[in-house]
Image (cartoon, rainbow, N blue to C red):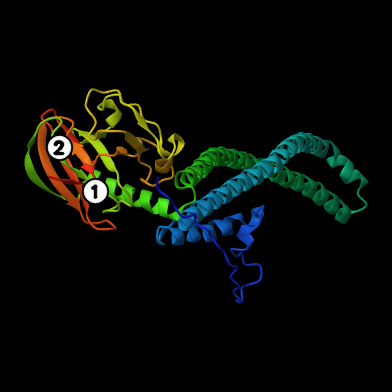
Amino acid sequence: MRKYLALILLSFPLFFFTLKPVGATTLDDCSQDPIPSDKAADCIDIISKKVSDLSNQKKTLANQIAHFDSQIQLTQLKIIDAQTTIDKLEKEIGVLGFRIGYINDSVGRLEGLLKERIIATYQQGFVSNLEILVTSRDFSDLILRTQYLKQVQENDKKILANLQQTKANYGSQKDEREQKQAAIEDNKKKLEVLKTNLDSEKTQKQALLVATKNDESRYQRLLAQAQAEIAVSFGGGTETSIRDVKAGDSIGNVISGRSGCSTGTHLHFEVHKNGTIDDPNNYLSSTSFDYPFGQSDSGSINPHGSLPWPISGSIHISQGYGMTPYASSGAYNGRPHFGIDMYSDSSTVKTVKDGKLYGGSYLGCSYGPLVYAKVIHDDGTETLYLHMIPH
């Protein structure tokens, strides 16, 4: 069994004596629980920069966990901001709805009354012209009364025009209300996506902690293997033709101990078909094996094909194919683990079927070059054997 040193993280408070504008949002403000809704927008920019800074730092378990924590916090801030926007829009829609309903009702009634008054005023004007003439004290009084009646009629027209314009203005607010309602629906959809992302980020963080057991050396081992497997699976190494082989032929030996992009003895086995990576479980036959690091850490496998295994003896599985706990932590950039990691008491590696053997190496690794073998088969499949010396 491999032993790992527990990673103990010590954090020390840092004090910065700086002058800042009154009311300016700081990282400390964004660390409050809960974060004030009026600070959410500013905090999104601050935490986004922190996430970017962490992404550019050296890959360590502590930094990866800090990156997850900051990303989770950023998503939570965006959720707060979206919810605040929804609440604000709903209040504005409520006010608009009240105004539109009240004004439409009031303007409608006032408009009706004013029209009746205008009609009555004009009717009265025709009847009372003689009365005005008779009752006027003198010519000047007659002129004043006539002008007054005319002014009343003009004012009524202006009032009616203003009422109609007010009604038209509030009619345009109906369009504004519809726009705000559409904005609410957009923010609700955004909110659902953010909540889904938040759950995913929390799951990835937990998967990383489960896979690494908060152990830096274990994290570095898995990270190195991930980098190597991605590099080889998508090209980048140099390969040399060695010879033709038959199923069961020995093609090399698993490297013992630490080697290129690996901190421990194991064979990584992959199957490619027509340029795509296939699940090795569909090719390897059923056999007995165990999980030395626990099935929950390694991810289960279910071989159900017809090909023999590339190693013999008591087989131990350190990581299966697919979205294993470590793959779920984001180690493969959202991709699954492309192969099956295994080891046994025997270091001999055998080809699983006839084909042409190639030896390859990849230099972009820690602990030296990653050495591997590849066998190209006549049916369009290729099998890859990483962390071994071919012969």
- Which numbered disc flags the more N-terminal residue, 2 or 1? 2
Query: Based on the displayed image, in which of its 4 quarters is residue 233 positioned?
Result: top left
- Helix, strand or loop at mark 2: strand
Badge 1 is on which residue?
A: 255
Query: In screen coordinates, is 144 left or right of 311?
Result: right
Tell me the distance, in whole angstroms, between the alpha carbons under discs 2 and 1: 14 Å
Does 350 sit left or right of 243 as displayed? right
Q: To which residue does mark 2 refer?
A: 250
**Residue at image coords 63%, 61%:** 29
Between residues 260 and 114, which one lies in front from this camera angle?
260
Q: Quadrant of residue 98?
A: top right
Amino acid type, residue under disc 1 in the picture: Ile
Q: Which part of the image, by quadrant, shows the C terminus?
A: top left
What mark, if any, has residue 97 been given in the picture?
Answer: none
Badge 2 density bin: few <14, some 14–19, many ≥20, Cα 10 Å: some
- Which residue is drawn at the image coordinates 38% and 43% (left, top)? 334
Q: Is residue 128 left or right of residue 68?
A: right
**Residue 12 image offset from top left, x and y in percent:** 58, 67
Give the structural element (helix, strand or loop) at label 1.
loop
Q: Residue furthest left?
A: 243
Which quarter of the image is occupied by the N terminus?
top left
* Amino acid type, residue under disc 2 in the picture: Ser
Locate residue 209, reporting x and y percent: 49, 47
Q: Residues within 10 Å of mark 1 (few under 14, many from 20)?
A: many
Q: Residue at image x 78%, y 50%?
A: 151
Q: Nearer the viewer, residue 98 or 200?
A: 200
Res 237 seen here: no
Counting from the top left corner in percent of width and height, residue 103 is at 73, 40
In x, y percent, where is residue 281? 30, 28
Residue at the image point whose x is 43% and y is 50% from the top: 3
Compared across the picture, whether 89 is left or right of 226 comes to right
Residue 161 visible (yes or no): yes
